[in-house]
Image (cartoon, rainbow, N blue to C red):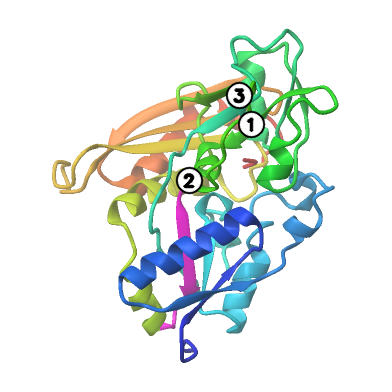
């Protein structure tokens, strides 16, 4: 199947952040001399904002319909938040390929409504992420938690509402939508040493049909090799944990040295991985370096599972 004539059709969710991301990819392609336009796709995750993500199927709930539009030929490519994509090949869509990782914004998480060390004892923090909840519970066992769904504006509006002291959001989302804290609302950006980000958080990913050579060539023009290197390392970590894991996980890779300095000629990477119990009582971390990103990701995952006791943490099935 080949792409339709005319501008590249980029499937996207209709949320403000998803549309920002799609238009950003349109702009990047335009800079490379390639015409593109967004195609809106309605997703179950956006429709059913009253249902916790874990009940809708967790990771992948925001991308299935967008991927299906590409697979059917209703769009030539799909623009995703890379963090929403399952890493396991078994959970991917046959015939689709990740053709570009155009850029990555700040991967850190943000606490909106206070600072972690000064929140009142027993304060309620709202988040729909098991990863965020388990790490916060480990750092502050006194905190209580409330679920959080909806677009970014809806979630941020919960600060101070119905007893909620603070909410957790992605720094990249706040930056991309140019959000500014209202007067009197304190904001703390959480370093990875405090809150390890979700796999591929802040990165964009563009997916197309594997047999659409013309679209793949176009998307190659906006693929950032440095971003791909670290994101693929993080995704390999998640994939090694297995598509059936619902435990909280996180990973963050950075290039410690430029390309060509590693033993195999690649960039020297440092990757930290996390695997936690759902209640936050046990949070396991491991950091390692290497110049083969996928192998590094897999090795960190195996250490957490086999050597650090991660396989004994609980029901095996990754939640983000």
Which residue is the site of mark 1?
Answer: 168
Task: Place residue 100 in its image quadrant.
Answer: bottom left
Give me the disc on residue 243: none
Q: CA distance from mark 3 to mark 2?
A: 19 Å
Q: What secondary structure is found at the residue carrying circle 2?
A: loop
- In percent of the image, x 64 and y 21: which residue is there? 184
Q: Which residues are magenta?
A: 202-212
Q: CA distance from mark 1 to mark 3?
A: 12 Å
Residue 207 belongs to magenta span: yes
Which residue is the site of mark 2?
Answer: 202
Q: Position of residue 202 (x, y in %)?
A: 48, 45
The nearer-to-camera label among 1 and 3 is 1
Q: Position of residue 220 (x, y in %)?
A: 33, 70
Left or right: where 253 falls relative to 182: left
Label 3 crowd bin: few (<14), some (14–19), many (20+), radius 10 Å? many
Task: Work out whether mark 2 precedes mark 1 in sequence or the reverse, and give the earlier one.
Answer: 1
């Amino acid at each position: 199947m080949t792409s339709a004539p005319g501008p590249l059709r980029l499937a996207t969710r209709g949320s403000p952040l998803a549309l920002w991301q799609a238009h950003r990819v349109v702009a990047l392609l335009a800079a490379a001399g390639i015409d593109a336009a967004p195609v809106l796709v309605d997703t179950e995750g956006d429709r059913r904002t009253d249902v916790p993500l874990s009940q809708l199927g967790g990771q992948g709930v925001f991308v299935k319909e967008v991927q299906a539009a590409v697979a059917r030929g209703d769009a030539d490519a799909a623009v995703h938040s890379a963090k929403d994509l399952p890493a396991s090949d078994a959970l991917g869509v046959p015939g689709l390929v990740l053709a570009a990782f155009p850029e990555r914004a700040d991967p850190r998480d943000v606490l909106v409504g206070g600072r972690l060390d000064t929140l009142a004892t027993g304060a309620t923090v709202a988040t729909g992420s098991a990863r965020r909840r388990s790490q916060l519970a480990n750092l502050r066992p006194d905190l209580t938690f409330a679920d959080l769904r909806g677009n970014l504006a809806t979630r941020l509006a919960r600060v101070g509402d119905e007893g909620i002291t603070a909410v957790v959001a992605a720094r990249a989302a706040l930056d991309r939508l140019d959000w500014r804290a209202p007067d009197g609302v304190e904001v703390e950006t959480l370093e990875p040493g405090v809150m390890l980000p979700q796999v591929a958080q802040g990165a964009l990913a563009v997916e197309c049909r594997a047999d659409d050579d013309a679209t793949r060539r176009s998307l190659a023009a906006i693929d950032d090799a440095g971003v791909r290197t670290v994101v693929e390392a993080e995704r390999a970590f998640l994939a090694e944990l297995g598509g059936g894991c619902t435990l909280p996980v996180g990973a963050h890779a950075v290039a410690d040295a430029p390309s060509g300095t590693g033993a195999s000629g690649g960039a020297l990477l440092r990757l930290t991985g996390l695997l936690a119990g759902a209640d936050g009582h046990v949070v396991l971390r491991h950091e390692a370096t290497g110049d083969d990103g996928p192998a590094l990701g897999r090795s960190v995952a195996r250490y957490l599972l086999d050597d650090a006791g991660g396989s004994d943490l609980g029901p095996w099935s990754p939640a983000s």
